[in-house]
Image (spheres, rainbow, N blue to C red):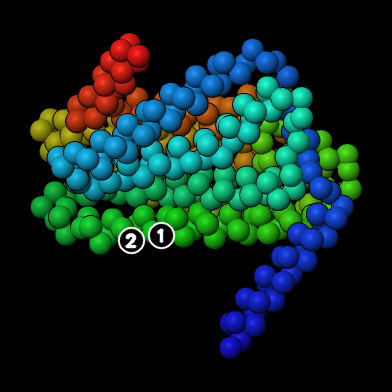
Amino acid sequence: MFIRVSLVSCITIILELFSFNFRLCNDFILLGFSDVTLFVLFLLIYVTTVIGNLGIIAAVWLDSQLQTPMYFFLGHLSFLDLCYSSVVTPKMLLSLLSERKTISFAGCFLQLYFYAAFVITECYLLAGMAYDRYVAICNPLRYPILMSKKVCVSLLAGSYAVGLFHSAIFTGFALRLSFCGPNVIDHFFCDGPPLSKLACSDTSLNQMLLFAFGGFNKVTTISIILISYGHILFTVLRTGSVVGKAFGTCASHLMVVTIFYGTLIFMYLRPSSSYSLGRDKIVSVFYTMVTPMLNPFIYSLRNKETSFIDVGLICCTFDS
């Protein structure tokens, strides 16, 4: 009974905050990029992202030889890349072509919520993929037990649960901020730091939560990845070239992790005084659009089982 009352109270407070802010601010203006010629470049990147990630998802879904934990996680990684790119890119493309560069108050916070949810989920999914590689190389005989279908689904569900929950906290505290105008966001999507700069109320708690939760997510998942690959490296050095060949399958995952975490840490785990909107917009393009486009190709180059996807995409492109 107490839990039900608390939940109702929380929902009521959030709705009241949303209603109050909505009365003060009906929409935001996204300045984004002013160069219309960038539309073609960004459109090509997005189309490549959609085709590449859908290709990975289709291959994992349809090919019986790819029904393994590694490709199960890879399929969901492609799904997340496709999702958080789609949360940001279509609106940005529309703004490049349109003179009306506004986004509604509700649309802005929905974009913030889903973007954060998918990115946080991907952090934990990448950690789960590192654990999968650790078990495959260091405990191959116990692999079917340690990475059973039930375990894989549990790891995936846990990743989504953490992502959705933490994103709800970020968005909820962002909703408590007051926006008195002018509501001009010097960015191409509704992200936390640019929104905080517009607030006319105290943002110190929001910045503290962003740093604390962001730091927790990054430290936790990076620790799992480093520990997993530390054990893998030790096993490779101890057993020699036979297992060393298996280490090559980890190279693609390490490349994705390095690119993904490098840009996220640069963007969110630094003092707010060091933010530069012009530079940060360029970095944001890299991790919201370029990274999701590159991931399918990185995995395809390193895994012969999925390399046929890129060949098929190229053939389809020339045939059309």
Residue 185 picture quarter: top right
Nearest the viewer among 206 and 194 is 194
**Residue 295 locus on image (x, y percent):** 39, 30
Q: Where, quadrant-wise, is the N terminus in this rendering?
A: bottom right
- Give the side of residue 4 with respect to residue 195, left or right: left
Question: Of the residues shown, which amino acid type is indicated by label 1?
Answer: Gly
Disc number at residue 312?
none
Kindly identify the residue that appears in the image at 72 percent across and 65 percent down.
Answer: 14
Kindly identify the residue that appears in the image at 28 percent across and 55 percent down.
Answer: 152
Which residue is label 1 attached to?
Answer: 158
Nearest the viewer among 302 and 246 is 302
Residue 225 picture quarter: top left
Q: Residue furthest bottom?
A: 1
Q: CA distance from mark 2 to mark 1?
A: 6 Å
- Give the side of residue 119 with respect to residue 236, left or right: right
**Residue 117 locus on image (x, y percent):** 53, 50
Q: Is residue 268 visible?
A: yes
Position above or below: 269 against 171: above
- Give the side of residue 55 with respect to residue 185, left or right: left
Q: Is residue 283 visible?
A: no
Q: Are marks 2 and 1 in contact (CB under 8 Å)?
A: yes
Nearest the viewer among 197 and 188 is 188
**Residue 133 locus on image (x, y percent):** 25, 44
Q: Secondary structure at mark 2?
A: helix
Which residue is label 2 attached to?
Answer: 154
Position above or below: 165 against 299: below
Kindly identify the residue that appears in the image at 54 percent across and 33 percent down.
Answer: 288
